[in-house]
Image (cartoon, rainbow, N blue to C red):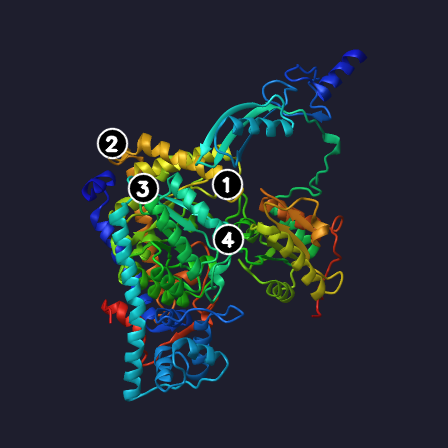
C-alpha cells in the first residue's frame, strides 16, 4: 500500500524527509516552551482526573474554584497538586469535593509544602490522579472490546456526519437515525463560542447556539445511546467532539473518561481563528494530546479552516505545512500514526479551470505524505452558494476525490451548507450521494495512476516545494533568538493571514511559568505510561 | 395590438389556465407574474419536503393534499422515498395558482453609485482630507468571521479587494466574538467613522438581538449626532429593517467590498449625499 502510493506521485523521498526535518526544527522550540509552562486548564484537568466534578449553584465548576483559590493564595508555579493534597493531609477537608466547596467560601488555607510534607502530598496526589488515568485505560480497553464485538465499518472512508441541534435530547435520536442511515462517526457540533469559555459547562444541556455544549454528562448520554445503536447495527459507531479552545486539556480529559473516539484537536486553530494566546494554546494542546494518546482517541486537525479564509490554490501549501507541524506535535505528545486524522478540504473555487485535477493533486499529496494516517477529508463550504443543485454536484465530485485517493474519514457534505442546519432529507440525500460514489468508484484507487510528470504529479511536487520553502522561511524568520521562530511566524501573519503575537490573545492570564519543584502527577503518569 | 387582443393578453397574464399560451408582448414582463417552467404562464414549480409518516399510499396522499393546499394544482407527485421507518421524502411538481403583482414589491434600490477603488480614494482625499476610519467585528458569540473578513481583508470577495486595500481608509478588524462594550470603546478610541458588524449565526434570532443591543449601546455612549455610522451585514437580515434595528444600513448576502466602499463614500464623504455632518472630530463623552 505504502509503496504503491509512493509510485502514484513519485515524490522525491529526500524532499519528503527534508519537509519533516524542517517541521521538527520549527516545532521543537515550541514544545520546549510548552514544557516550561502550565495553564489553569491543565491544572483543572489534573483535578478532574482525580475525580473532582460538579459545579456550584451558579454553574461555576468546582475545579475552577479550587484552582483559582490555590492560585490566589500560593500561585500555580509549582502546580495545583502539591498545595491541594497538602491541605487534604493537614485535614482542611475530608475529601477533594469538600475542599473545593470550602475553598470557594474562602475557608481553606493553602501552603506550599516542603520536604517530607511535599513528597507525601505528591504521593497522595499521584494515587488520586492515577485512578482517573486507569478509568481512561479501562475505557480504551472497553472500546477495543466493543469494536471486536460489533466490528469496524465495512468500507473506507468511514462516513462522518454532524448533528447540531443545541439540545442533547434532540441530538440523541438524530444521531441514532444518522447511524442507521449509514454514518460511522457522529460528531456533535459544539455551541458557538464554547471554545472561548474558560470553564467546562456542567450537566445535560438543552440550549446552545448552532450546536450543543460539550459537557461530561452530554458526552456520557450520547456515548450510551450510540452503544445501543452499535449493538443494534452490528457496527461500532464512533463519537466525536471538539477539544480546541480555552479548555482543551479538560475537554480532552472528559472525552477520555467518557470514551469518546475522536476529538477535533488542532495545534494552531485556537490561535489563528479564535485569537487564543499562542503559548496558552501550545501548552494546552500538548497536555490534551497526551491524554488523547493514552485514551486511544483519534485526533482530527483543522486544516480545512485555512482554505476557508485563504484561496485554496494559493494557500494549498499552508495546509501541508500545518499537517507536518500537527504531525510533529502529535507524535511528540505520544500519538501514533493511526490516531492522526490530519485534515484537508475540497475548497477550490469550481470556476477555476482544472479545479478537480488540482483537488486530486492536493488530496493525493496528503495521502502520500502521511500513508499510515487516516486523513480527514472535508467537503466544500466556501463555494456552496445556496444553489443546492450545484452544491449536490460539487459534493459528488468531493466524494469522488475521497474515493479515488483513499481517504480515511469522509465528512459528508450537505447541499444545504450555508443555508440551514441539515434537515433529515439533506442528510439522506447526502448519504445517497456518498453511497453512490463509493459503490460506483470506490475501487478507482486501484486503476488511478496519474501519468509521470503530468499535471497532477507536477502540481503535487510544486505544493510540496512551496511547503518546504515556507517552513524554511518560518525557521529563518526568528525576530529574537529567545523566541521560537514558529511563534514569530504566527505573529507575522504567516498562517491564515492572521497576526497573533505571543503577548496577546485570550487566555494569556491563565498561563504560568513553572518553578523548580513543579509537580503534576497527570503529566508524570502520561509521560511514564504508568498506571499507579 | 387591438384593445381586444390587449385585454386577452392581460387576462392570460393575470389569470391564465395551466399551459395556456400567453400573448405577452416582447417588451418585457407585465406587472403580474407567475412561475415559468417551459411555457409562459404555466406556473410550474417544484417543491420537496419530508412528512413524519412511514412511506405508504396514505403518506403520498397527504403529500399531494399538502401541495394542493400550497396552491399547486394539479400536484404531480414525482418522487417519494422512505427515510427510515418514520419519515418520507417527496418531490412534487405542478402549476401554482398564485399570482404576484410586481408593482406591490418593495425593494431597496441601490441608492448610491458604484465607484472604483481609485474614485473612492480620491473622494476621501478631496472631501474628508483625512483617512476614513472603519472598525469591523463579529459580535456576540458569533465566531464566523467569513462575512466581515470578506469585506475587510485585503483578500476580499468575488474578485474585489477588501477595504484594507483602500489607501485612504484606516481599517481595524477586531475579529470574532467581540463584546459590545469592547466594540463601542474601540470605536470611540479610534474615532471610527463607520462600524461594520457581521452576524452569521441566526439561531433564535441571535443576529437581531445582538444588533439591537449594539445600536443601543452606541447611542448610549456617544452624544447624538456623533454616533459612528452603523452598518450590519449577514445572510439573514431583511433589507429595509435598518431603522427597526437602530442601524444606518443593512447589507445582505453577496455584498461585495466595492459596494460597501461606495456606500461609505455616499453616506459619509460625498458632500452632496452624506448624512452625517463633517468634520466630526470630537466625539468625547462616556
Crowd band around label 3 with a 10 angstrom C-alpha radius: few (<14), some (14–19), many (20+): many
Pointers 1 and 4 in contact (C-beta within 8 Å): no
Residue A60 in the image, given as x and y percentages of width and height: 50, 70
In this view, which residue lies farthest toward the right? Answer: B3
Please give left or right for residue A356 compared with residue B186 in the image. Answer: left
Q: Earlier in the sequence, mark 2 or mark 3?
A: 3
Do residues under tags 4 and 2 come within 8 Å of each other at their CB atoms?
no
Query: Of the residues tagged 2 and 3, which is closer to the observer?
Result: 3
Q: Which residue is mark 4?
A: A167
The residue that mark 1 highlights is A423
Earlier in the chain: of badge 4 and badge 2, it is: 4
Tell me residue A486's x, y (percent).
Answer: 36, 62
Q: Chain of mark 2?
A: A
**What is the CA distance from the residue labelled 2 to the residue labelled 1?**
36 Å
Whether labels 1 and 3 share one chain: yes
Tag 1 secondary structure: loop
Quick one: A134 or A276, which is closer to the camera?
Answer: A134
Measure the alpha-carbon separation of dots 2 and 3: 17 Å
From the viewer's perspective, is residue A150 above or below residue A74?
above
Residue at position x 75%, y 18% in the image: B10
Quarter of the image that includes the N terminus of chain A: top left
When asked about the image quadrant of residue B73, the answer is: top right
Q: Which of marks 4 and 1 precedes in the sequence?
A: 4
Amino acid at each position: 500500500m505504502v509503496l504503491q502510493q509512493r509510485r502514484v506521485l513519485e515524490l522525491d523521498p529526500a524532499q519528503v524527509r527534508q519537509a519533516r526535518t524542517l517541521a521538527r526544527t520549527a516545532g521543537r522550540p515550541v514544545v520546549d516552551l510548552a514544557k516550561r509552562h502550565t495553564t489553569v486548564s491543565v491544572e483543572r484537568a489534573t483535578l478532574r482526573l482525580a475525580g473532582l466534578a460538579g459545579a456550584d449553584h451558579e454553574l461555576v465548576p468546582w475545579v475552577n474554584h479550587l484552582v483559582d483559590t490555590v492560585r490566589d493564595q500560593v500561585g500555580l508555579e509549582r502546580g495545583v497538586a502539591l498545595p491541594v493534597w497538602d491541605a487534604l493531609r493537614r485535614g482542611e477537608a475530608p475529601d477533594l469535593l469538600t475542599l473545593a466547596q470550602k475553598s470557594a467560601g474562602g475557608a481553606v488555607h493553602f501552603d506550599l509544602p516542603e520536604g517530607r510534607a511535599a513528597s507525601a502530598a505528591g504521593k497522595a496526589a499521584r494515587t488520586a490522579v492515577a485512578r482517573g488515568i486507569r478509568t481512561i485505560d479501562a475505557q480504551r480497553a472497553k472500546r477495543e472490546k466493543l469494536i471486536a464485538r460489533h466490528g469496524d465499518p465495512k468500507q473506507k472512508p468511514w462516513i462522518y456526519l454532524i448533528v447540531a441541534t443545541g439540545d442533547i435530547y434532540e441530538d440523541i435520536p438524530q444521531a441514532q437515525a444518522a447511524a442507521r442511515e449509514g454514518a460511522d462517526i457522529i460528531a456533535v457540533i459544539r455551541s458557538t463560542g464554547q471554545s472561548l469559555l474558560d470553564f467546562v459547562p456542567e450537566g445535560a444541556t438543552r440550549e446552545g447556539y448552532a450546536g450543543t455544549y460539550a459537557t461530561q454528562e452530554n458526552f456520557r448520554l450520547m456515548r450510551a445511546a450510540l452503544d445501543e445503536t452499535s449493538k443494534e447495527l452490528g457496527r461500532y459507531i464512533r463519537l466525536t467532539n471538539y477539544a480546541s479552545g480555552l479548555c482543551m486539556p479538560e475537554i480532552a480529559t472528559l472525552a477520555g473518561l467518557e470514551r469518546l473516539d475522536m476529538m477535533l484537536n488542532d495545534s494552531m486553530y485556537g490561535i489563528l481563528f479564535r485569537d487564543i494566546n499562542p503559548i496558552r494554546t501550545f501548552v494546552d494542546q500538548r497536555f490534551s494530546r497526551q491524554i488523547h494518546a493514552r485514551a486511544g482517541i483519534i485526533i482530527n486537525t483543522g486544516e480545512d479552516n485555512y482554505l476557508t479564509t485563504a484561496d485554496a490554490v494559493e494557500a494549498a501549501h499552508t495546509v501541508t505545512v500545518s499537517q507536518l507541524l500537527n504531525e510533529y506535535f502529535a507524535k511528540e505528545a505520544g500519538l501514533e500514526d493511526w490516531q492522526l486524522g490530519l485534515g484537508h478540504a475540497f475548497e477550490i473555487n469550481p470556476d477555476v479551470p482544472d479545479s478537480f485535477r488540482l483537488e486530486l493533486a492536493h488530496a493525493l499529496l496528503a495521502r502520500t505524505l502521511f500513508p499510515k494516517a487516516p486523513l480527514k477529508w472535508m467537503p466544500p463550504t466556501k463555494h456552496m452558494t445556496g444553489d443546492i443543485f450545484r452544491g449536490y454536484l460539487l459534493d459528488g465530485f468531493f466524494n469522488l476525490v475521497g474515493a479515488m485517493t483513499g481517504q480515511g474519514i469522509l465528512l459528508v457534505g450537505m447541499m444545504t451548507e450555508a443555508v440551514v442546519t441539515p434537515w433529515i432529507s439533506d442528510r439522506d440525500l447526502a448519504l445517497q450521494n456518498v453511497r453512490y460514489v463509493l459503490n460506483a468508484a470506490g475501487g478507482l484507487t486501484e486503476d488511478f495512476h496519474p501519468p509521470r510528470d503530468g499535471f497532477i504529479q507536477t502540481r503535487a511536487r510544486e505544493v510540496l516545494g512551496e511547503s518546504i520553502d515556507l517552513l524554511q522561511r518560518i525557521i529563518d524568520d526568528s525576530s529574537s533568538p529567545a523566541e521560537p521562530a514558529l511563534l514569530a511566524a504566527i505573529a507575522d501573519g504567516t498562517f491564515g493571514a492572521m497576526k497573533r503575537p505571543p503577548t496577546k490573545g485570550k487566555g494569556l492570564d491563565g498561563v504560568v511559568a513553572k518553578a523548580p519543584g513543579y509537580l503534576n502527577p497527570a503529566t508524570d503518569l502520561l509521560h511514564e505510561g504508568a498506571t499507579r | 395590438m387591438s384593445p381586444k387582443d390587449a385585454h386577452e393578453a392581460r387576462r392570460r397574464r393575470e389569470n391564465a389556465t395551466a399551459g395556456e399560451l400567453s400573448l405577452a408582448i416582447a417588451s418585457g414582463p407585465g406587472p403580474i407574474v407567475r412561475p415559468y417552467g417551459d411555457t409562459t404562464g404555466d406556473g410550474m414549480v417544484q417543491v420537496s419536503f419530508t412528512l413524519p409518516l412511514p412511506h405508504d399510499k396514505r403518506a403520498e396522499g397527504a403529500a399531494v393534499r399538502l401541495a394542493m393546499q400550497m396552491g399547486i394544482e394539479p400536484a404531480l407527485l414525482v418522487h417519494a422515498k422512505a427515510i427510515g421507518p418514520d419519515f418520507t421524502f417527496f418531490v412534487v411538481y405542478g402549476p401554482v395558482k398564485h399570482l404576484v403583482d410586481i408593482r406591490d414589491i418593495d425593494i431597496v434600490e441601490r441608492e448610491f453609485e458604484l465607484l472604483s477603488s481609485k474614485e473612492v480614494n480620491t473622494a476621501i482625499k478631496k472631501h474628508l482630507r483625512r483617512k476614513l476610519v472603519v472598525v469591523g467585528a463579529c459580535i456576540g458569540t458569533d465566531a464566523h468571521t467569513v462575512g466581515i473578513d470578506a469585506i475587510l481583508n485585503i483578500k476580499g470577495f468575488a474578485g474585489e479587494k477588501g477595504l484594507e486595500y483602500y489607501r485612504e481608509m484606516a481599517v481595524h478588524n477586531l475579529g470574532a466574538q467581540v463584546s459590545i462594550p469592547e466594540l463601542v470603546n474601540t470605536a470611540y478610541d479610534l474615532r471610527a467613522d463607520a462600524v461594520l458588524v457581521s452576524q452569521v449565526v441566526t439561531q433564535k434570532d441571535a443576529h437581531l438581538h445582538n444588533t439591537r443591543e449594539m445600536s443601543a449601546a452606541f447611542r448610549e455612549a456617544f452624544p447624538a449626532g456623533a454616533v459612528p455610522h452603523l452598518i450590519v451585514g449577514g445572510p439573514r437580515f431583511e433589507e429595509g429593517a435598518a431603522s427597526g434595528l437602530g442601524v444606518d444600513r443593512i447589507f445582505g448576502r453577496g455584498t461585495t467590498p466595492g459596494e460597501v466602499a461606495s456606500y461609505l463614500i455616499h453616506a459619509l464623504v460625498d458632500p452632496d449625499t452624506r448624512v452625517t455632518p463633517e468634520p466630526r472630530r470630537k466625539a468625547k463623552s462616556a
